[in-house]
């Protein structure tokens, strides 16, 4: 077949170009070019994923710093109730208080039916009201199961009422009633009741109003012996006996916080001694002290 010189030259050039393309292609596929292409391709594919996975460190740090600053700079509320007083019924506490029904079981018996035989008033509410007040009844004899007790204020001083199983409240006066508790933590000692400190030179008095072996109720006073005047410091505290004979109580102090204390008794040659300890020193006319020891 006859071929022209021009055709031969053109065919040769095309052959060279084809060989060059094949070589370049092999370079790209099998040589460093392929590695570069693969690497660049990997980067292109992974960059968006990598960027999205990187946490916003600045934002997180700023948020944490802001929260820490808020916590550290928030002012602490100072207590507002800066009065020395007994605990109240609506205070968070561990021990009973005046005007609270305290669990107690036992049996109470009428031994004298009133001064003139008028009967003993069983009150519908824990208070001394008229015998004819709504809900009250009068009983003349018999024994009654007790389910609780409550110390109410009568002329400013705590007085013990017993609560019957059917919900009535009756006097605890030993003149009219005889009471037998199902159990007591310590042996009841009527000799503990009374005033301590009248003959001591400490300008302090402690008055114990009631002691039944489960609870003891008392007040602490500043005392002006020359004038015979007493000024209440901590009134009408209900303390609960532990098995060791020490009674525990709580009180609210003028520092704005609640504190604990103990009261204990011991026999002396002349009678009784009371020992009261306080969690923090309490202010009295003669100064601050965390322990009060007085004789009866």
Image (cartoon, rainbow, N blue to C red):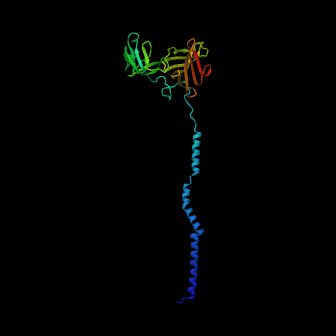
Image vertical order of residue 13 relative to residue 160, above or below: below
Give the residue at the far top of this rendering. Answer: 116
For the C terminus, the quadrant is top right
Residue most extreme to the bottom? 2
Q: Identify which residue is drawn at 51% across, 14% down.
A: 191
Question: From what the image shows, is residue 81 above or below residue 27?
Answer: above
Q: Position of residue 200 (x, y in %)?
A: 60, 14
Where is residue 90 drawn, in percent x and y? Answer: 48, 28
Residue 150, quarter of picture: top left
The residue that appears at 54% across and 58% down in the rendered structure is 49
Q: How many marks?
A: 0
119 with respect to 278 (left or right): left
Q: Position of residue 131 (x, y in %)?
A: 39, 16
Residue 237 appears at what percent x and percent y?
A: 52, 22
Would you identify the image quadrant in which residue 220 lies?
Answer: top right
> For the point 58% across and 47% down, which residue is it?
62
Above/below status of 100 relative to 118: below
């Amino acid at each position: 077949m006859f071929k022209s010189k021009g055709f031969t030259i053109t065919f040769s050039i095309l052959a060279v170009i084809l060989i060059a393309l094949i070589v370049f292609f092999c370079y790209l596929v099998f040589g460093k070019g392929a590695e570069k292409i693969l690497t660049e391709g990997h980067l292109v594919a992974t960059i968006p994923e990598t960027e999205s996975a990187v946490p916003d460190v600045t934002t997180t740090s700023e948020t944490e710093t802001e929260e820490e600053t808020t916590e550290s700079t928030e002012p602490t509320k100072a207590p507002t109730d800066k009065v020395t007083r007994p605990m109240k019924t609506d205070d968070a506490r561990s021990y009973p208080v005046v005007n609270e029904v305290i669990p107690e079981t036992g049996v109470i018996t009428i031994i004298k039916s009133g001064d003139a035989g008028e009967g003993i008033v069983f009150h519908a509410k824990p208070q001394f009201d008229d015998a004819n007040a709504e809900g009250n009844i009068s009983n003349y004899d018999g024994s009654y199961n007790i389910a609780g007790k409550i110390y109410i204020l009568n002329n400013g001083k705590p007085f013990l009422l017993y609560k019957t199983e059917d919900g009535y409240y009756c006097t605890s006066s030993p003149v009219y009633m005889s009471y037998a508790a199902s159990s007591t933590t310590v042996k009841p000692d009527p000799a503990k009741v009374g005033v301590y400190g009248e003959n001591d030179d400490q300008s302090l008095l402690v008055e114990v109003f009631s002691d039944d072996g489960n609870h003891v109720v008392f007040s602490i006073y500043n005392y002006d012996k020359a004038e015979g005047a007493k000024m209440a410091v901590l009134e009408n505290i209900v303390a609960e006996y532990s098995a060791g004979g020490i009674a525990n109580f709580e009180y609210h102090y003028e520092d704005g916080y609640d504190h604990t204390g103990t009261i204990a008794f011991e026999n002396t040659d002349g009678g009784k001694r009371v020992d009261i300890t306080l969690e923090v020193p309490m202010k009295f006319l003669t100064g601050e002290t965390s322990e009060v020891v007085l004789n009866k």
